[in-house]
Image: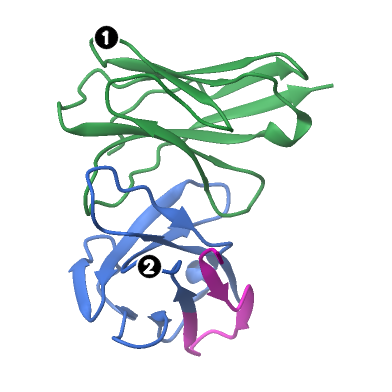
Chain colours: A blue, B green
Amino acid sequence: NAGVMQNPRHLVRRRGQEARLRCSPMKGHSHVYWYRQLPEEGLKFMVYLQKENIIDESGMPKERFSAEFPKEGPSILRIQQVVRGDSAAYFCASSQGVGKSNEQYFGPGTRLTVT
Amino acid sequence: DAKTTQPPSMDCAEGRAANLPCNHSTISGNEYVYWYRQIHSQGPQYIIHGLKNNETNEMASLIITEDRKSSTLILPHATLRDTAVYYCIVRVGYGQNFVFGPGTRLSVLP
């Protein structure tokens, strides 16, 4: 049973370019979460999605960042016009979304470097 | 904000039990206690979770006090590969994100 898949694992972008990060949840999971980890800091929640719906985007920066989880295909975190401060590890997690205890399983992350 | 308090760092001798404490004095009746760890810069790894009963799986044991205001994660025979940052998180089970605090950096020493 494959775990959470993220690609690319490493992404280098110049300032002003767009970054697209993809996340395929575990089989049977319909809930996806995105987190960001800046160098030497803890993980910070960004956005929580179910299929075709954004449930909670309270952690998303107001500008340049967007996320989607279409009916078919992976979840996408999009960062437009990247700046050096966007350099970080971006982790995706998935869960079943049902049941009382709803552990999340994390992917290996995408390391974004903005030059 | 994280609702838990953990020591910033701990050492443990290889082969010994590692006991990692966590205080969550404001925990609500419907909140679970979850433990994750992050080895180097990898994605966080789920370890165990519980509501009020003690739990055990192939990785660890979780001891929750009767008043649920604190818990202890036990790694029964720590190895060098258990060196990581361990996060204790309290959360309602369904549909909420995790709030990660600074965690405990466990160093397993040879």
Residue B79: image location, x then y, percent: 75, 28
Q: Is residue A77 visible?
A: no
Q: Which residues are magenta?
A: A1-21
Nearest to the observer: residue A81 or residue A6: A6
| Residue A9 on the magenta span | yes
- The label shown at residue A28 is 2
Relative placement, left or right, of A34 versus A114 is: left
Q: For residue A59, what is the image quadrant? A: bottom left
| Helix, strand or loop status at disc 1 | loop
Disc 1: CA contacts within 10 A as few (<14), some (14-19) or many (>=20): few
Which residue is pictured at 62% across the width and 53% down the height?
B42
Which residue is pictured at 38% across the width and 67% down the height?
A28
- The label shown at residue B66 is 1
Which chain's residue wears label 1?
B
Disc 2: CA contacts within 10 A as few (<14), some (14-19) or many (>=20): few
| Residue A42 on the magenta span | no
Q: Quick one: which residue is furthest to the right in this view?
A: B110
Q: Are marks 1 and 2 on the same chain?
A: no
Q: Quick one: which residue is furthest to the top in this view?
A: B66
Q: Quadrant of the C terminus of chain B?
A: top right
Residue A4: image location, x then y, percent: 51, 65
Q: Quadrant of the N terminus of chain B?
A: top left
Kind of residue sitting beneath label 1: Glu
